Amino acid sequence: MKEVMSHLKNLDYSVVQQCMHCGLCLPTCPTYDATKLERNSPRGRIALMRAIADEKMEATRTFADEMYFCLGCLACMTACPAGVNYAELFEHARAEAEQSGALDSQGRGLVRGFTLRWLFMDLRRLHLVGHVLRLYQGLGLQTFVRRSGLLRLFPKRLRELEEMTPTIQQKFSDDLIAPVTPADGDKRYRVAMLTGCAQDLIFSDVNRDTVEVLARNGCEVVTPPEQSCCGSLHAHNGEWKLAQRLARVNIDQFPPEKFDAIITNAAGCGSHLKHYAKLLAGDSAYEKRAHLWDAKVRDIHEWLAQIGIKAPKAGTRTDEAWAALPASAASARADHENQRAKIEPRHVGHHDEEMIVTYHEACHLCHGQKITAQPRQVLRAIPNVKLVELAESTWCCGSAGIYNLIQPEMATELLNRKLGHVRKTGATVVATANPGCLLQMVNGARREGMQVRLAHPITLLAEAYRRAD
């Protein structure tokens, strides 16, 4: 009988045995903080992983449940004095859980088959679903369903999921961004722009803003209209082979040798994109190119800090001045205002007034990529911005990929904790650099009736450039 490959048993054992069990990770782990149970801590989870690697236990339902109770926020990696690569362990542990079949059920199989193995393997399918959702929302059917009371006939969990349905953008990235955007002024760099999955459907305006900011900072930007998922969703949910397949597709579409940098504006994607070499280790056709890929991937804040941010000039754009701009610029402003009105509480104030901004650090930006100073550098470059630090800014908001879908109680607890700290800042704008965090906090702020705007730091920078033109 053919032996089934074990992810943890076949993993480099030096990775598995790094943990010294010192416990310095415990205070930084949101799930341990909530339960005070050892098994809900990084140290406890690593002990389970090591037991499987040592062939002292098999992947059981209890093991699988524990791996999916973990947020994967990687705060433990920031705290760890031994440099334990928990991100690698976490992905292999979830792959082990999936391979064991411990969580298998017909319903779960259908959901994973539709989402991970079909929908997110070809973004044309995701766009199709986006078009259907946009029609459902645009025709007022969503409003009708919500007001009619029909949702009361559904189970509580389905009602909660319906409330989390994001507003789909009127235009996706390929409608807003040219395949090649020339540099504004002297061309210094040639970069590729990754438009993402959720970012493309829900926050395509952020992609447009990112390309504009890059162009204003001397970059020629290549943005192919048809792109693929980066594979982070698959790698974080145990679909190792699908993640590898998507990595190969991306390397072929964006040959790293042709660009000075490959830009991402989504923290969760960026953390995964920088580790294609690990993912494709042993692949004779792609491993060498994957190392070059990893060296070229840059988070947008990281890249701007590296090349030097062109600071916007202070200025206030009047409606008359906006009307005098080229149609593309005026359209950008109108699209942004329309979308913001749909998904965010209305921000009251004028552009020449001081804007009080606080910054929530997406886990995979601060812990996964160790990027903390650069987004603040971007925000401080914007005229009339007062940056107020957020307590527990590096503490997870509960989004964590699809965590808020599969662990709603813990996700809500973390979201409420985050919003409580936001209130204390007195900020009118919360900046964060991940679509999952943005959507999680938009939904939470709406539910709580908070008059605060949620925005990507790059959107705030793009708006500042336009006001000063």
Image (cartoon, rainbow, N blue to C red):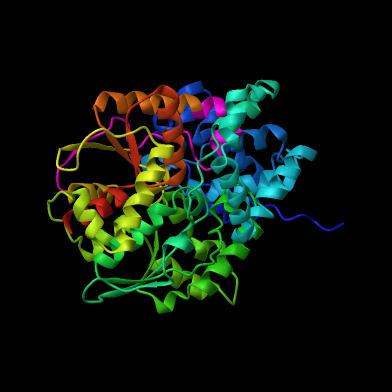
The reply to whether residue 400 is visible in this rendering is yes
Q: Which residues are magenta?
A: 383-411
Q: Is residue 110 left or right of residue 372?
A: right
The percent coordinates of residue 373 (x first, y second) are: 25, 48
The quarter of the picture where the C terminus appears is bottom left
Rendered view: 425 above or below 9? above
- Determine whether 430 is above or below 154 in the image: below
Residue shown at the point (64%, 40%) measured from the top left: 51
Which quadrant is home to the N terminus?
Answer: bottom right
Q: Is residue 370 visible?
A: no
Query: Residue 384 lies in magenta, yes or no?
Result: yes
Quarter assignment of residue 101: top right
In the image, residue 47 above or below residue 127: above
Q: Position of residue 343 (x, y in %)?
A: 43, 38
- In the current view of this chain or complex, which residue is farthest to the right? 1
Whole-percent x, y for residue 461 in the image: 25, 52
Q: Is residue 74 left or right of residue 130?
A: left
> How many numbered discs sit on the rendered protein?
0
